[in-house]
């Protein structure tokens, strides 16, 4: 009885409550602000829960990257800077509003960047990033767009410093492959999957057409997948391979051409007279210092690696050629000094022999000079002859002839004295010719050896292939 009496009152209360809720729902779709408050209201939308969690399937996230700039490629720190636009798209059924009046009014809604904190977003991060920040000029460069079917587009502009493990065996004739590696930090592959957006046959990796780099040329880019398994599980991973070809023109102008001229200049020393000691020594020393300074300047711009680089081979070879030129000059001096010493010994022997022949002749002829006086004259003239080694053999011969005529006018001069100038001239030739011969051989052999080295160097390093193992 009481229930039958209270039933009309219950019906009235229920009708009033339903009418109030419906009027509020109808009022919510009249303005964008109230519609958004209803769409992402914390009472019906929990940003802590990923999409499709209740269905026990992974949320698929598609990505695209637009590279604006690549700069500051640093071989010492092995990193580079990039300015890129990173876009992510996924479906969130809780944001589907296709059944409302706003689906016809606005097929997609662009949200204010501050609302990104009120919806779920993937926990994607750049695995090889050293530094990074979002661009905030003039406002935070972030875009959030919700489609009526629940598709969410999240775009942001990022300024990143990324690690790039370089292989410098061929430097500066090398090509490098740098990577942009993106992965999920906390969600396993059963919860979150990453894919490159290849819709409409448009590449997921787009590069600014005006992109220029001082040392490199971007020859190719490729999108790849790299799912990783760690101690905490298997995680989604995608990456971009950027193929960078080093511009060799700069190094040809500032490195290879100057060092080649330095080596060629060292070959000029072979044509300078070996008796010009200051000129040849100073030239070789200056070239050695120049090559060493240039090599040290190059090494200061590169990391300390355990392997030998192409630039190390080149600069070491240039230093060896210049230093070998200095050693060649030392060898020429040794040969010249030994030759001069042999000439002096030979000349002294011939002079003493001539004097002994004259003494024997005087004794045989019964000359009136005493033996002591004859030996004193012999020693005196021998000493004078040795002091006149440099080109006075003809005068010595005349002096000897006059002396012999004075002492024995009626007898002819011994035959051995007449042949002395010719013998000295013949003995003097090999000294200079031997040293000049070594210089002549070096003037031909050194340039030929440097040309052969160039042929081998360029053939080896232009055809060498360095394998990149990207982890």
Image (cartoon, grey):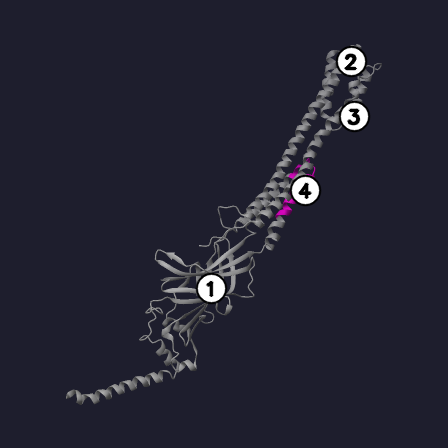
- Which range of residues does the magenta coloring cover? 259-280
Residue 471 left/right relative to 190: right
Measuring from the top left, give residue 405's x and y in whole percent: 82, 17
| Image point (70%, 23%), residue name | 346
Circle number at residue 361: 2
N-term mark: 4 or 2: 4
| Image point (42%, 61%), residue name | 237
Between the C-alphas of marks 4 and 1, the distance is 54 Å
Reading the image, the residue beneath label 1 is: 159
Label 1: how many residues lie within 10 Å, few (<14), some (14-19) or many (20+)? some
Q: Is residue 323 above or below residue 429?
A: below
Q: Are marks 4 and 1 in contact (CB under 8 Å)?
A: no
Q: Nearer the viewer, residue 152 or 330?
A: 152
Mark 4 vs mark 2: give the one in front.
4
Based on the picture, tell me whether residue 261 belongs to the magenta stretch.
yes
Measuring from the top left, give residue 435's x and y in whole percent: 68, 33
Between the C-alphas of marks 3 and 2, the distance is 22 Å
Circle number at residue 58: none
N-term mark: 3 or 2: 2
| Image point (50%, 51%), residue name | 467
Mark 3 vs mark 4: give the one in front.
4
Between the C-alphas of marks 3 and 1, the distance is 90 Å
Q: Nearer the viewer, residue 227 or 87?
A: 227
Q: Nearer the viewer, residue 354 or 15?
A: 15
Between the C-alphas of marks 4 and 2, the distance is 55 Å
Measuring from the top left, give residue 326's x and y in whole percent: 62, 38
N-term mark: 3 or 4: 4
Residue 19 left/right relative to 176: left
Reading the image, the residue beneath label 3 is: 394
Circle number at residue 268: 4
N-term mark: 2 or 1: 1
């Amino acid at each position: 009885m009481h229930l039958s009496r209270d039933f009309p009152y219950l019906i009235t209360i229920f009708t009033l409550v339903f009418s109030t809720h419906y009027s509020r729902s109808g009022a919510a779709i009249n303005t964008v602000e109230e519609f958004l408050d209803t769409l992402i209201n914390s009472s019906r939308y929990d940003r802590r829960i990923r999409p499709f969690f209740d269905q026990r399937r992974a949320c698929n996230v598609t990505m695209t990257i637009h590279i604006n700039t690549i700069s500051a490629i640093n071989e010492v720190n092995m990193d580079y800077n990039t300015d890129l636009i990173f876009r992510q798209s996924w479906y969130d059924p809780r944001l589907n509003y296709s059944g409302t009046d706003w689906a016809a009014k606005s097929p997609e809604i662009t949200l204010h960047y501050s609302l990104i904190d009120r919806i779920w977003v993937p926990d994607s991060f750049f695995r090889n990033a050293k530094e990074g920040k979002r661009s905030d000029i003039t406002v935070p460069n972030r875009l959030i767009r919700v489609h009526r079917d629940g598709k969410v587009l999240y775009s942001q502009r990022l300024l990143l410093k990324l690690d790039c493990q370089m292989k410098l065996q061929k430097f500066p004739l090398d090509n490098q492959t740098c990577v942009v590696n993106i992965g999920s930090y906390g969600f396993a592959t059963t919860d979150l999957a990453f894919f490159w957006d290849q819709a409409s046959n448009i590449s997921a990796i787009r590069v600014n057409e005006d992109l220029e780099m001082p040392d490199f040329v971007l020859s190719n880019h490729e999108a790849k997948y790299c799912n990783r398994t760690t101690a905490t599980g298997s995680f989604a991973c995608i990456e971009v391979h950027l193929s960078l070809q080093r511009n060799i023109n700069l190094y040809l102008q500032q490195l290879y051409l100057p060092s080649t001229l330095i080596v060629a200049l060292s070959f000029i020393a072979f044509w300078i007279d070996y008796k010009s000691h200051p000129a040849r020594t100073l030239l070789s020393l200056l070239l050695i210092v120049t090559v060493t300074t240039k090599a040290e300047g190059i090494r200061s711009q590169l990391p300390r690696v355990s392997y030998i680089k192409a630039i190390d081979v080149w600069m070491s070879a240039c230093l060896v050629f210049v230093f070998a030129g200095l050693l060649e000059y030392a060898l020429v001096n040794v040969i010249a000094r030994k030759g001069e010493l042999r000439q002096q010994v030979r000349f002294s022997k011939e002079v003493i022999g001539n004097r002994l022949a004259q003494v024997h002749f005087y004794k045989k002829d019964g000359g009136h000079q005493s033996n002591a006086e004859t030996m004193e004259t012999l020693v005196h003239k021998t000493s004078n002859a040795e002091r006149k080694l440099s080109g006075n053999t003809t005068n010595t011969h005349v002096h000897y002839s006059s002396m012999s005529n004075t002492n024995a006018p009626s007898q002819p001069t011994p035959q051995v004295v007449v042949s002395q100038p010719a013998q000295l001239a013949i003995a003097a030739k090999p000294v200079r010719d031997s040293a000049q011969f070594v210089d002549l051989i070096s003037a031909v052999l050194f340039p030929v050896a440097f040309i052969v080295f160039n042929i081998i160097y360029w053939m080896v390093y232009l055809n060498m292939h360095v394998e990149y193992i990207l982890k």
